Image (spheres, grey):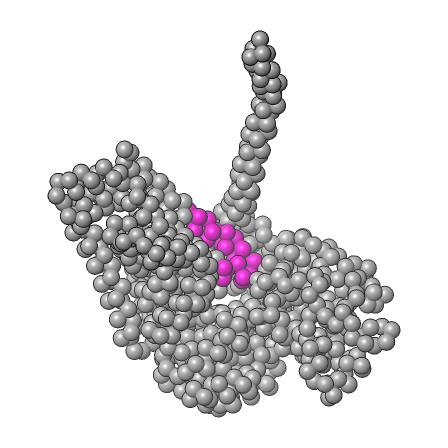
Amino acid sequence: MKKSISTIALLGMALVFGLSSTANAQSGRDYIYIVGSSTVYPFATVVAERFGRGTGFKTPKVESTGSGGGLKLFCDGIGVNFPDIANASRAIKQSEIDNCAAKGIDEIVEVKIGYDGIVIANSKKSALMHLTRKELFLALAKNVPSAKDGELRPNPYKLWSEIDPSLPATRIEVLGPPPTSGTRDAFVELAMDGGCQEIPSIKVLKSSNEALFKATCQTLREDGAFIEAGENDNLIVQKLEANPAALGIFGFSYLDQNMEKIQGASIDGVEPSFDAIADGSYPVSRPLFFYVKKAHVDLIPGLREYINEFTSEKAWGDEGYLSDRGLIPMPATERKSVGAAVRSLSPI
Amino acid sequence: MMNSNLGQTTRHRVEASLKRRYAKERRFKAAGIAATFTGLAFLAIFFVNLVSQGTSAFQQTMISLEINFDRTALAPDGDVDPNADYEAVVRDSLRSLFPDVTDRRERRQLSSLLSVSASYDVKDMLAADPTLLGSTQTVWLSASANVDMVIKGNINRDVPQDLRTVSDLQLLWIDELLAAGRLEKKFNTALFTNGDSREPELAGIRGALMGTFYMLLVTIALAFPLGVAAAIYLEEFAPRNRWSDLIEVNINNLAAVPSIVFGLLGLAVFINWMSLPRSAPLVGGLVLSLLTLPVIIIASRAAIQAVPPSIKEAAFGLGASRMQVVFHHVLPLAMPGMLTGAIIGMARSLGETAPLLMIGMVAFIVDVPGSVTDPATALPVQIYLWADSPERAFAERTSAAIIVLLAFLLLMNLAAVLMRKRFEKRW
């Protein structure tokens, strides 16, 4: 027994340390390593899979880390231990470009892949909502200018009809993503900020007191009217079905897949549809990107081919397979110019 | 007189309270039964819900087509050409069933009834058996996830066309295929042989299962010997003083630390400092072994304590050294208990997701891992990723993956119980 126990122990140790030393010794990486936004994830994974199946290269590994987390990993350094591509549901920030530059990554190729709409939807069992961005701001901001004197006060609205008599007299109850989500960032920036600026008393703050302006426009209320429902958009769809009075905020692809159960509210008079987002008339839509480390293009096999696959007409085109998944394609002329820039790998 | 009087009153009081005390006991029993049944009822609801949603995923709709393995198209130079247009072969076969569909858009719709995997399946079939060249075979090929959902009743046919993912025309074709007996539900082998995929009909749990397997291998290889060694030392060799007390308290605390903390530790130590590869089952296993170590130490110490002192004393009395007593007598008797502890620890790590998030194992990985350093996910991570996918067909696959995970948990716990029953000694 003594012998067998110590042999097991020794074998176990040898196994683990042997393995870790081989892992340390591995120098090359023969697959592409992608990180970033959970909004781009469904599109990047489809391209990755087709790429892996259609070419001799290995299927890329795609990690869903959120836009900010992905760009942080991306900017950690150059080499096989660091990601080759970061997906983002917003453009890269100057601070992130600086972080990258500090680690020697000074050539980053930006690839815009298309658009994504953010929808505010409710169950088909209740009436279709017609909202404006201003109404959304008034319903969801933490502090709003009071109707009497225009001073900023904690949000008093409990029913939609208190904001505008044309809206239904139901309780304000909106399910949305948590602060870590890019969808939340984009919603705050496009819908809340946009609605905020339609109120003159706040708009003047933009030049006089920018910090207060930002805090007012971008802070969501915390008194239970806005409910953080987690990153899982499917769960929000299910909750909307169970509670017809509630509204939910999520990406267009989830509306697209569940059209028979839920309906998207019109924003500023435009209903969320494929065409309305594509031509830019639907106000709450954002561009999606991925960023490539130029230094890795010759280091990692297949990276150039992956970029070509993603920017090919059969992927991101009007009839491409990404549009079947809910990506809103760019206009043909824009696709052409972005595609040309990407093929020559011109850095930002 | 006084005494008997007193005796009578006591007895009287006891008898008087008897009914009340029995009633109290009955009430307590009723509450206990109610609590047990509430728990069981929730468990039953959970299982019924899971099984009713998940079992359909073990079947996949297939379409039978006559595939013509044409020599000129597939083997122009005599040998099978792997780059031939297999998609066209499959497409032509499907079109021949509906010769009156000529419009380009309608043809596209028709082709989308089949899974994208159909052409790869045909290619693999021919590669495996080149004698098929020149023949025409009836082949069952995967239907697309949308067709699968229609057959399983998960797409509502009654709503207007633009509100569902299947068009009226496609429904018509599906009905025609059904009537012709060309559409059938068959066992979903892809679920067990494929890695992850974004096409629901192609997505499988093999990659996640292998990832979990490699991870648990590393965990048991590391945590079991370390845990047993620590337990033996603490129980049999370590002096009892303030330091050993402190260590004991810390081990018990460690067992209660939230798992995400171990993930952060793993990220800092194994990936950033030791620069092991991200997303590898090796790192996952290292993190999970930290997580299971306290569980194994505690269980092993309890097992050692359960060995009767008389056995130890007898061995000492015969002149055995401390080392001999431990390895010849205590350890063999305590082993079943230690193994049970190890299996329960493994079962716990089987279900962990949170620490894996930090070390990059929550990722889309198609290729099935072949070693502990290949990128991999684990079964609970796969469940999480599928639960978050927009496509409807992933919902049932999520439940199916949960059923598989639960089956493994059940097996492991059963093994622990059986082992205890088989080897347990009573004194």
Residue B258 visible, this angle: yes
Residue B67 visible, this angle: no
The outermost residue toward the front is B2
Left or right, residue A119 beside residue B218: right
Quick check: A110 above or below A177? below
Magenta segment's dominant SS is helix
Which residue sits at x=40%, y=71%? Answer: B268
Which residue sits at x=39%, y=57%? Answer: B250
Q: Nearer the viewer, residue A192 or B321?
A: B321
Residue B398 drawn in magenta? yes
Quick check: A222 above or below A315? above
Quick check: B218 above or below A206? above
Which residue sits at x=71%, y=81%? Answer: A212
Q: Nearer the viewer, residue B310 or A272?
A: B310
Q: Quadrant of residue B227?
A: bottom left
The outermost residue toward the right is A148
Q: Nearer the viewer, residue A110 or B426?
A: B426
Rendered location of residue A40, percent (x, y): 54, 73
Rendered location of residue A4, percent (x, y): 18, 51
Disc tally is 0
Rendered location of residue B165, percent (x, y): 60, 61
Residue B221 drawn in magenta? no
Residue bounds of the magenta highlight = B384-407
Left or right, residue A135 beside residue B260: right
Which residue sits at x=46%, y=89%? Answer: A101
Q: Quadrant of residue A264?
A: bottom right
